[in-house]
Image (spheres, rainbow, N blue to C red):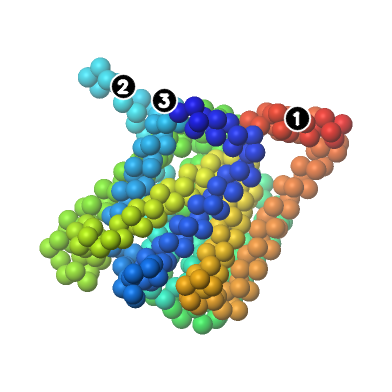
Amino acid sequence: MSVLKTMQTKLAALGIFAFCFGYFASYVPYSMMTKMITSGLFEGMSGKHFSGFEILPAVGTATFIAMYVYLTLSGWWKHSTHSTILGVSIPRPRWITFISGLCTAGVIITTTLSYALEGISIVFAMLLMRGGTLVIAPIVDLIAVKRKRKIYWPSWAAAALSLAALFITFSGRAGTTLTLVAIINIACYLLSYFLRFFFMSNWAKSTDAAEKKRFFTEEQMVANPVFWGAIMITGLIGSQMDPASIPGQVWQGMTTFLSSGYVIHAFLVGIFSYGTGLFGTLIFLDPRENTFTVPASRVSSVIAGVVATYALAIFYGSKYPPTSELTGLALLIVAILFLSYHSIVEKKKRAHYDPRALEKEAEEVHHPHILKAQAEKAG
């Protein structure tokens, strides 16, 4: 437990950059292993592969276990809302964290399926998901009820670039592979993130560290059990259906897949999936506006997706991304730079005119000993 707390202290010292690296480090193996197990690229598979629905039971079980272990070792259960039942204090979510947790469960399911759908590359799926969330970020900042934020021109420019990236991607050959299932999956992903950002912006993005831990813990205690429970129920329904149907494939994942020899691979996908959820949420809960925190996480996943795609192409003979996807990716990176522009420039201005500004900001984001040194240097 002391080791985990020491790691948390070091991560806090590095701030959002440490969370971005953790997100990147989790995303590379998560996306890569998902594509490998659903494309038959692991050693010994000899072309045999499993659908995204077949691996969901193992992935869901792994994320459920990872969530419980992390919250227990970190001691964050105590930050959640509690109710006393028969003399026992039991952690529970509030209504806002319950809905946000449901949305998080939706994000977990749709992200895994996006990288598992046949005929869709990691880069293509990533462009659709990341481009969509970049468009969502300034909208949420604009309509937030409790903490409405001003939207600056770089945000609108980035939104336009994101849309252009999506248009160019669709104009290429990859756009023809987008099936109805993929469209519904991406739509559910974006809707889930929109609602989640909205609740975070109004009730969790503050300078109160305890409130952020409270929101995170309550959201997680809903998201992963719901994710796991939905998979189990779907699988049980599928036991009476055609094995080729979606519920039937989930049932195969609960039965025949267990003897396939690749359960541990799917289990690791779930562990890394929780890693992306953990670090991604910590990034989003940073008190700064969504137009800063969303790009911070998106650039990590974009780079991770490219690394995973080229690793698969180089070592496993997968296809390299086409020009249209790389062009869209370049526009997405430019969009991220636009979104970061205002925050970076404003921060430098505050430091120039008020050397104590960095120290004040350090107190807000709970990393005083690092930014205080920067403020002293600026003075």
Q: Nearer the viewer, residue 31 or 137?
A: 31
Q: Is residue 252 left or right of residue 329?
A: left
Residue ID at (42%, 37%): 70
**How far is disc 3 from disc 2 in space, using C-alphas?**
10 Å
Q: Tag 2: residue type?
A: Ser
Q: Is residue 77 above or below residue 262?
A: above
Q: Going from the N terminus, do you reach mark 3 or mark 2 first?
A: 3
Query: Label 1: which residue?
Result: 372
State the image quarter where residue 288 is shown: top right
Query: Label 2: which residue?
Result: 89
State the image quarter where residue 234 is shown: bottom left
Q: Nearer the viewer, residue 14 or 226?
A: 14
Residue ID at (70%, 58%): 337
Q: Tag 3: residue type?
A: Lys
**Quarter occupied by the C terminus:** top right
**How far is disc 3 from disc 1 in space, using C-alphas?**
30 Å
- The secondary element bearing badge 3 is classed as helix
